[in-house]
Each structure stands twice: as structure tokens, then as C-alpha cells.
Image: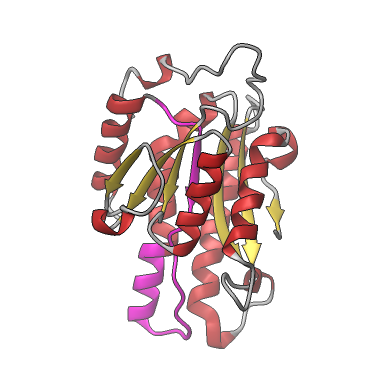
């Protein structure tokens, strides 16, 4: 994180409750080029947030509403550190990370595990670690990851996927312990069976994410919620 980041905070309009709300909050959406990313970025923007859209292909981010768009390999620690430095230089510290990078592969094969670990675990670990101090210092910091209800009922046929999601959830809960003392930031897990027409609509997910800034951090921190 850039050395001057903690000295700057996004200032709300006069009379705005600095403990909650999205007005003028700076929120990074990771995985912003997929359907859920576009839906979340749209809802956040409509609620008054300033969205930073991050994806693996800048061209695919063109239709995502955002004040800035960034191409980054979030599985690369060095790449994420460079992204954080650039964001701090251009915008200052952020108030939220919404992690929507993922994917699904069944089974137990080594190649599938490596793919899932990179996308599900490493992208979340790198991004949350790079912006942790921002979120901790924010009067309304939120770290949000989307997990799976299958973590509650793991199967041998789905072992790689469930293990990766379980590891990411453990990281999210660890972040929650780091936020607990200040009481203004929250790490939240949203668990869905699936996203899309056969599961939780992306609009429903997006609406639930927006409400996280209207709820007390102390009540949300460490929570696992089914939208």
C-alpha cells in the first residue's frame, strides 16, 4: 500500500453518516467483466458509490460502469501490489472490495485444483491483503466474497472446488478478526448454490451487496449470509 494512502479518506457530503452508506465510497469490484460484476457495479454506482472495475481483459470491462477500469492478473501478488499503488496514487484508499472472481471445476485432478486455487483462493488472498489497511481504516470498510453453499456439504466428486472455497472462507474469517478491534470494517461471506437463471439471480446478489453498507459493521463482520 502506498505510504500516503492512510492519510486520505473519502469525504462524504455534509450531514452524511460516515458510519454507513455508499455515497461517495470508493469500491473495487474484482471480476467486474462477468455478469455478476456488471450487475454489482451498476447497483453500486446507482447507490452513489465510485466503482473501480478490475478484470483480466480491459476490453471486456468497457460495458461495466466505473470511474476507472484496470486490467490485472489478481493471482499475481506483484501485479496486485502494482494495482494497489496505482489506485492509491489516482484515487486514494478504498472503502470496499467485492470479490467476484471464481469459476467451477468438479473432481480431484491436480490441474483442476491448480486452476481453482489460483482463481478462487489466490485472487482473494492477494486483493484483500493489498487493501486490508484501507478497509480497516475506512469508516465503512467492507470486504465481500461470494462462496458456495456446497461448503456445508462437501462431496468427494466436488472435492477440489469445495476445498478451494473453504480456504477462501477461512481467509475471509481471518480478515474479520483483523477488523474486529476498530469496529468500522466488516468481512462478509455471501454463500449461494449457484448464480444465474438456475440459482441466485445476479441482480439479487447485487442488491444484497449494496445493503451491506447500510448495516452495522459489528453485526456483519465475520458473517456468512445466504442472499
The quadrant of the rendering that contains the C terminus is: bottom right
Q: Is residue 105 magenta?
A: yes
Query: Along the line of sight, which residue is nearer the eye, 119 or 195?
Result: 195
Query: Along the line of sight, which residue is nearer the eye, 122 or 134?
Result: 134
Q: Locate residue 85: give its quadrant.
A: top left
Q: Position of residue 226 (x, y in %)?
A: 71, 60
Which residue ends up furthest to the top in the rendered image? Answer: 14
Q: Position of residue 9 (x, y in %)?
A: 47, 18
Q: Is residue 32 left or right of residue 216?
A: left
Q: Position of residue 139 (x, y in %)?
A: 59, 23
Q: Which residue appears at 32% of the width and 54% of the height?
A: 61
Q: Is residue 174 above or below residue 39?
A: above
Q: Position of residue 147 (x, y in %)?
A: 58, 62
Q: Which residues are magenta?
A: 93-119
Q: Is residue 55 above or below residue 199?
A: above
Q: Is residue 53 magenta?
A: no
Q: Which residue appears at 35% of the width and 64% of the height?
A: 118
Q: Is residue 164 above or below residue 131?
A: below
Query: Along the line of sight, which residue is nearer the eye, 23 or 28?
Result: 23
The quadrant of the rendering that contains the N terminus is: top left
Q: Which residue appears at 46% of the width and 29% of the height?
A: 133
Q: Locate residue 113: give its quadrant.
A: bottom left
Amino acid at each position: 500500500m502506498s505510504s500516503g494512502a492512510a492519510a486520505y479518506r473519502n469525504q462524504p457530503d455534509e450531514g452524511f453518516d460516515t458510519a454507513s452508506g455508499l455515497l461517495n465510497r470508493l469500491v473495487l469490484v474484482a471480476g467486474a467483466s462477468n455478469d455478476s460484476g456488471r450487475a454489482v457495479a451498476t447497483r453500486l454506482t446507482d447507490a452513489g458509490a465510485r466503482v473501480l472495475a478490475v478484470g483480466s481483459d480491459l476490453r471486456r470491462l468497457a460495458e461495466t460502469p466505473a470511474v476507472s477500469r484496470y486490467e490485472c492478473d489478481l493471482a499475481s501478488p506483484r501485479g496486485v501490489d502494482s494495482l494497489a499503488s496505482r489506485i492509491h496514487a489516482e484515487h486514494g484508499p478504498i472503502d470496499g472490495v467485492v470479490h467476484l472472481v471464481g469459476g467451477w471445476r468438479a473432481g480431484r485432478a491436480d490441474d483442476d485444483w491448480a486452476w481453482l486455487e489460483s482463481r478462487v483462493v489466490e485472487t482473494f488472498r492477494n486483493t484483500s491483503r493489498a487493501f486490508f489497511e484501507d478497509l480497516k481504516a475506512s469508516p465503512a470498510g467492507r470486504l465481500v466474497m461470494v462462496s458456495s453453499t456446497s461448503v456445508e456439504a462437501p462431496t468427494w466428486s466436488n472435492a477440489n472446488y469445495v476445498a478451494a472455497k473453504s480456504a477462501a472462507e477461512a481467509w475471509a474469517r481471518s480478515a474479520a478478526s483483523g477488523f474486529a478491534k476498530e469496529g468500522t470494517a466488516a468481512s462478509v461471506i455471501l454463500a449461494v448454490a449457484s448464480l444465474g437463471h438456475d440459482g441466485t439471480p445476479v441482480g439479487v446478489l447485487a442488491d444484497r451487496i449494496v445493503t451491506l453498507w447500510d448495516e452495522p459493521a459489528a453485526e456483519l463482520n465475520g458473517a456468512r449470509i445466504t442472499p
